[in-house]
């Protein structure tokens, strides 16, 4: 199972409040583990313009404002830009597939400050990580559902609605979900 480029949808009662009603875009998944970014939890205490000032990145009248999110509980002082596939950093971009990439270097922030960069993006602080077999185990224990990632869902500005939209993309009515797993 390779979930790179897919979305995880947190199930009710998964037990970790940091992931309550989370939608996670999977940047990488292999036998060595998995890495993803929560895409529906905006950061409440950080604005992109403030970050540029802190990093001493000069802005221009063309500077773009990027939405800042909580990407997960691991390394939450580190930033990751999840973006459309139309951008490739000279320094390092992880190409998830032809539609999505992830860049974690300053050059992408400098591009935004100059009015350039990818067409669509989300800046996330921290990431969600799993060791070998951990994510597969959580899925088997009814912690997550998976769905296809679409740019419309991933980059939607309706963060509060992403969880429900992701569930409905699978034909699941959020009101009918149970936090209990079972076997038939």
Image (tube, rainbow, N blue to C red):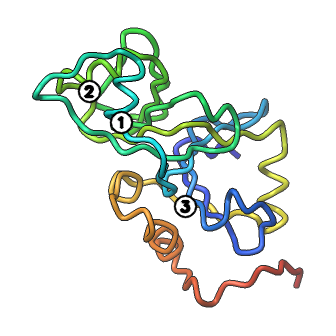
Between marks 2 and 1, how big is the CA–CA gap? 10 Å
Total marks shown come to 3
Label 1 packing within 10 angstroms: few (<14), some (14-19), many (20+): some
Please give left or right for residue 100 compared with residue 1 in the image. Answer: left
Helix, strand or loop at mark 1: helix
Mark 1 or 3, closer to the camera: 1
**Residue found at x 46% / y 17%:** 105
Residue 55, percent from left and from top = 41, 18
Q: Specify which label sits upstream in the sequence, 1 or 3.
A: 1
Please give left or right for residue 104 compared with residue 31 in the image. Answer: left
Mark 3 or 2, closer to the camera: 2
Please give left or right for residue 157 compared with residue 114 in the image. Answer: right
Q: Which mark is residue 112?
A: 2
Q: Which mark is residue 48?
A: 1
Q: Is residue 160 above or below residue 76?
A: below
Q: Residue furthest left?
A: 61
Q: Is residue 75 above or below residue 20?
A: above
Between marks 1 and 3, how big is the CA–CA gap? 29 Å
Q: Are marks 2 and 1 in contact (CB under 8 Å)?
A: yes
Please give left or right for residue 71 compared with residue 162 in the image. Answer: right
Q: Specify which label sits upstream in the sequence, 3 or 2.
A: 2
Q: Which residue is mark 3?
A: 147
Residue 136, percent from left and from top = 79, 51
Label 3 packing within 10 angstroms: few (<14), some (14-19), many (20+): some
């Amino acid at each position: 199972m390779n979930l790179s480029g897919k979305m995880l949808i947190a199930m009710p009662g998964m037990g970790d409040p940091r992931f309550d009603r989370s939608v996670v875009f999977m940047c990488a998944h292999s036998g060595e583990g998995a890495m993803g970014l929560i895409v529906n939890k905006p950061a409440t205490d950080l604005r992109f313009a403030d970050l540029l000032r802190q990093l001493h990145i000069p802005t221009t009248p063309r500077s773009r404002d990027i939405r800042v999110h909580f990407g997960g509980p691991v390394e939450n002082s580190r930033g990751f830009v999840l973006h459309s596939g139309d951008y490739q950093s000279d320094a390092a971009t992880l190409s998830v597939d032809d539609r999505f990439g992830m860049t974690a270097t300053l050059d992408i922030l400098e591009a935004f400050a100059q009015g350039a960069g990818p067409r669509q993006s989300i800046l996330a602080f921290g990431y969600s990580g799993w060791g070998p077999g951990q994510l597969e185990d959580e899925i088997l224990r009814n912690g997550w559902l998976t769905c296809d990632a679409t740019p419309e869902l991933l980059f939607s500005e309706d963060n509060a609605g992403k969880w429900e939209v992701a569930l409905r993309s699978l034909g699941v009515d959020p009101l009918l979900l149970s936090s209990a797993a079972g076997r038939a």
